[in-house]
Amino acid sequence: MVTRWLPGDKAPAGELMRNAMRVLAGRELPSTPPPQAPANPSTQRERLSAEAFKLQGIPYVWGAKGPEAYDCSGFTRAAYHAIGVQLPDGSFNQAKGERPLEDPAALTAGDLLFYRWSEDAGVSHVTLYAGDGWVIGTGSPGQPKEVVLYPLSDDLVDDGRIITYRHIVLADE
């Protein structure tokens, strides 16, 4: 049985995060075609998605903050900045308020996904949930080293990694 982590807690417990990943690892997610950028975005969340999609193909360079190249947190920061939301630099700083990912159905397009490579490691990677089981970001291990769209299921493996998420409520929600 997985004990629930409450949002008021300082940080998700390692055992809870590990148990959540064990449940998710190898889980078949619905196979859906990749989402498309919103054609006529009218909400902040749609504008966020559109901005993230515009950055596809830009190379990954560790520590890069754009616009010619991005690292993982530089990409998420740039996408949110384009809609007027300021995020701090660094995946570990953007993770404030993270929760264990227990069910991918809980995700909303624009949610930040945080990665640890073991339960006792700090956050070291961030991507953006694109919706319909897809992620956009600078690529987790095994992905191209550029801003790319790929299935979340590629990241749901039981190799010691832990994924948490953060939902940012936007002004028009």
Image (tube, rainbow, N blue to C red):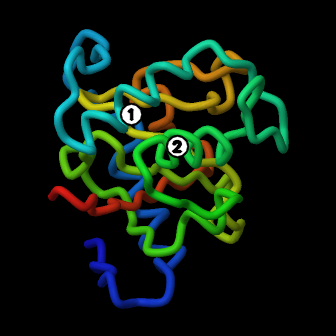
Is 118 on the left or on the right of 5, as rendered? right
Identified by mark 2, the residue type is Asp
Image vertical order of residue 156 relative to residue 54, above or below: below
- 70 with respect to 49 (left or right): right
In the picture, the quarter occupied by the N terminus is: bottom left
Residue 105, picture quadrant: top left
Q: How many marks?
A: 2
For the point 59% across and 50% down, which residue is it?
161
User: Would you place residue 161 above or below residue 3 in this image?
Assistant: above
- Residue 146 position in % (x across, y down): 68, 20
Q: Is disc 2 surrounded by few (<14), some (14 to 19) or many (20+) residues within 10 Å?
A: some
* Residue highlighted by disc 1: 26
Q: Where is residue 6 in the image (x, y as percent from the top left)?
A: 30, 84
Query: Which structural element holds mark 2?
Result: loop
Q: Where is residue 77 in the image (x, y as percent from the top left)?
A: 58, 48
Report if the CB atoms under discs 2 and 1 are less than 8 Å apart: yes
Which amino acid type is shown beneath numbered disc 1? Gly
**Residue at 62% of width from left, 12% of height from top?**
57
Q: Mark 2 points at which residue?
A: 158
Q: Which of marks 2 and 1 is nearer the N terminus?
A: 1
Distance of mark 2 from mark 1, alpha carbons? 7 Å
Image quadrant holding the C terminus, namely: bottom left
